[in-house]
Amino acid sequence: MERNELCWCGSGKKYKKCHMAIDDKILLLTIQGHITPDRELLKTPAQIEEIKKSAALNTAVLDHVAAHIHAGMSTADIDKLVYDFTTAHGGIPAPLGYEGFPKSVCTSLNNEVCHGIPDENIILQEGDIINVDVSTILNGYYSDASRMFAIGEISERAKRLLKVTEECVERGLAAAKPWGHLGDIADAINSHAQANGYSVVEDIGGHGIGLEFHEEPFVSYVTPKGTEMVLVPGMMFTIEPMINEGSPDFFVDEDNGWTVYTEDDGLSAQIEYMVLVTETGVEVLTK
Ligand code: MF3
Ligand code: CO
């Protein structure tokens, strides 16, 4: 595109005052052999504004769950909280019907790594740890985040896992820098997990998000520093490592085709932030 034309992103600015420098930098890095994002992975200002509204609703849904989660309720009750609150605010729960997923939210308990299906027969017990993974569509725009909840008093062992998992995500976030690499985030997470005797699940990871539920790139949390896709302003993706107490190995429930369990039956925890890369840093949109 010519320097004095209006920028492709719709900002209304001239290309030379908007994305020209970013595009030039991407081109150079591509020539140097780095993995760089295609233009469609860079959200425009108008898209960012809309996606932020979806993300704000997503956070409100998680806050609503946080205010009501308690021992004695079923994971189907959590599903109802999510469905009712989301739809009352004009949103649609993204998991519902996604590739056949039957419910509005993923609820993964104790030895479940992710993608647990809410069920009226699964009752929260004192001492449980549970990941509630909420994803929202608002006006066609997607957002995604998850939190861990401790049900009543939990074991020291579970407390340590939750603490380290949060530290892992925060360290990953701190390592995320414009023009850095996805592997910088992964390395920060993986090394902290390992330093604490834990492991990071491979093969299941994060993803680009915003215009779709799951966009490019796939985000691994076990890759080395300085590898994988370059982080370019406008990119949006999730930081959502799954941290296992024991082995990183897992298996998928044969009956429901979704729920992922630890192979060794150890505890697993996950926290998910959805982030936007900016020119100066990384902004958390929902967590
Ligand atoms: N929120 C999950 C993620 O982070 C979505 C899993 S797909 C579902 O990618 F259908 F199970 F919701
Ligand atoms: Co996600």
Image: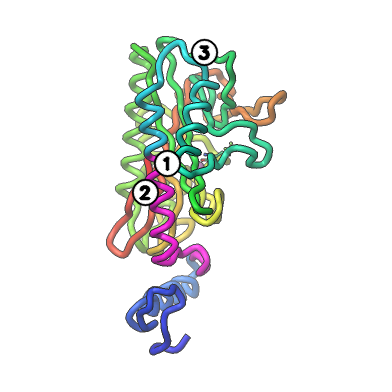
Q: Which stretch did the figure color magenta? A: 36-59
Residue 68 can be seen in this image: yes
Q: Residues within 10 Å of mark 1 (few under 14, many from 20)?
A: many
* Frontmost residue, 98 versus 163: 98
Of tags 1 and 2, the one toward the viewer is 1
Give the quadrant of residue 253. Answer: top right
Q: Is residue 47 above or below residue 146?
A: below
- At label 1, the amino acid type is Asn
Q: Residues within 10 Å of mark 2 (few under 14, many from 20)?
A: many
In which quadrant is the C terminus drawn?
top left
Secondary structure of the residue carrying tag 3 is loop
Q: Which residue, given by chain and number where applicable, does mark 1 sit on?
A: 58
**Residue 123 bears which disc, if any?**
3
Q: Is residue 37 magenta?
A: yes
Q: Which residue, given by chain and number where applicable, does mark 2 sit on?
A: 285
By secondary structure, the bulk of the magenta-drawn segment is best described as helix
* Frontmost residue, 276 versus 48: 48
Q: Are marks 1 and 2 in contact (CB under 8 Å)?
A: no
**Residue 44, image x, y percentages:** 43, 67
Give the mark nearer the N terminus: 1 vs 3.
Answer: 1
Q: CA distance from mark 2 to mark 3?
A: 31 Å
Looking at the image, which residue is at 32% across and 53% down? 283
Q: Are marks 2 and 3 in contact (CB under 8 Å)?
A: no
User: Is 62 placed left or right of 138 in the picture?
Assistant: left
Secondary structure of the residue carrying tag 1 is helix
Q: CA distance from mark 1 to mark 3?
A: 24 Å
Q: Residues within 10 Å of mark 3 (few under 14, many from 20)?
A: some
Q: Is residue 181 above or below residue 66?
A: below
Looking at the image, which residue is at 69% across and 26% down? 256
Q: Residue furthest left?
A: 280
**Residue 137 bears which disc, if any?**
none
